[in-house]
Image (cartoon, rainbow, N blue to C red):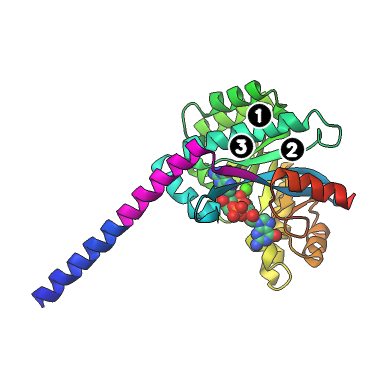
Amino acid sequence: NQITGTVATCVVVLIMQADVDARRALEGEVRRAIARGEFELHYQPQVDLKGAMTGVEALLRWRHPTKGMVPPNAFIPLAEETGLIIPIGEWVLRTAAAQLQAWSRLPETQHLTIAVNVSATQFRQPDFVEQVRAIVTLSGARPQALKLELTESVLADDMGVVQTKMKALKDFGICWSLDDFGTGYSSLSSLKNLPFEQVKIDQSFVRELLTDPRNGAIVETIMRLSVSLGLAVIAEGVETEAQRAALEAAGCQCFQGYLYGRPVPVCELLAQRSAAA
Ligand code: C2E
Ligand code: CA
Ligand code: CA
Ligand code: CA
């Protein structure tokens, strides 16, 4: 029995060690990836009621030399734990701001906005506000064209601090959007007190909108709440015309999802659009 116990302990230690090794390896790879320029932003259209593109969400991709395209869910959680999300997030902001500046020079693209995902770890950096202002100013992009998406996890932080940071960037011209709304720590009073301009209905509600009536009730509640708080609403994960129609019937006026386009590199985004027009 004691032997079995010892063997079990050894196995557990080995598994934990393997986990630590895998993490170290990934951490090293992420650092090299930043240095070698292996990260890319793909852009997914956001459209209005008429289906016209008003902007995009920037979604991070890692073009790994041997593993191919690595999706963000495979490395962002670790990047958050290790703090590597800070340099990655900075690269994302710089790249998106440069794209906005490039778009501002063409009449067909100058109205487009870019929504960038900001992780809670990144937002919590004491110099976050200064960093965003510096990046946008240096790029020459209009702050009004940049949207920052935050998830509900930051709503659990010290409200005073969150409020001050968000307000400083709002005063600078940047717009705030609350991502994955309804899936996490939703404090309605904090929503009221923070300068969000938009909420994103999470794709989990959209996915089963037509099959589970409870999701319809959630979507309608989000719509009513948002209207009364003066917030715009965008639905994400819209894949079918039936979903779009149900969302529109509930009052939603802005959509994002495979129905309109998958996240693609910038050249494909504009090629698709001009082909469609
Ligand atoms: P998210 O911010 O909720 O982004 C939406 C995710 O849904 C994206 O996955 C997008 O490709 C996917 N999606 C869009 N439309 C549809 C649809 O119609 N159907 C379905 N099934 N999925 C759809 P992706 O690109 O794999 O990103 C996953 C998550 O990784 C994002 O979720 C976001 O939390 C995070 N992420 C992506 N880029 C960044 C970044 O630059 N910084 C940070 N901090 N996080 C990022
Ligand atoms: Ca997002
Ligand atoms: Ca989302
Ligand atoms: Ca999500």
Q: Residues within 10 Å of mark 2 (few under 14, many from 20)?
A: many
Within 8 Å of ligand 2, the CB of disc 1? Answer: no
**Amino acid identity at mark 1:** Lys
Residue 170's tag is 1
Residue occupying the far bottom of the picture: 1
Q: Mark 2 sits on what residue?
A: 113
Q: Residue 162: percent from the left, percent from the top?
A: 53, 34
Q: Residues within 10 Å of mark 3 (few under 14, many from 20)?
A: few
Badge nearest the viewer, 2 or 1: 2
Disc 3/disc 2 C-alpha distance (Å): 25 Å
User: Which of the 4 image quarters holds residue 182?
Assistant: bottom right
Q: Mark 3 sits on what residue?
A: 193
Q: Residue 212: percent from the left, percent from the top?
A: 68, 72
Q: Is residue 223 above or below residue 101?
A: below
Disc 3/disc 1 C-alpha distance (Å): 14 Å
- The reply to whether discs 3 and 2 touch (Cβ–Cβ < 8 Å) is no
Quadrant containing the N terminus in the rendered view:
bottom left
Disc 2/disc 1 C-alpha distance (Å): 15 Å
Residue 253 placement, left or right of 10:
right
User: Which of the 4 image quarters holds residue 190?
Assistant: top right
**Amino acid identity at mark 2:** Thr
**Amino acid identity at mark 3:** Asn
Badge nearest the viewer, 3 or 2: 2
Q: Is residue 214 above or below residue 27?
A: below
Camera-nearest residue between 78 and 222:
78
Q: In the image, is residue 22 part of the stretch drawn in magenta?
A: yes
Secondary structure at badge 1 equals helix
Residue 136 placement, left or right of 232:
left
Q: Magenta region: which residues?
A: 19-41
Badge nearest the viewer, 3 or 1: 1
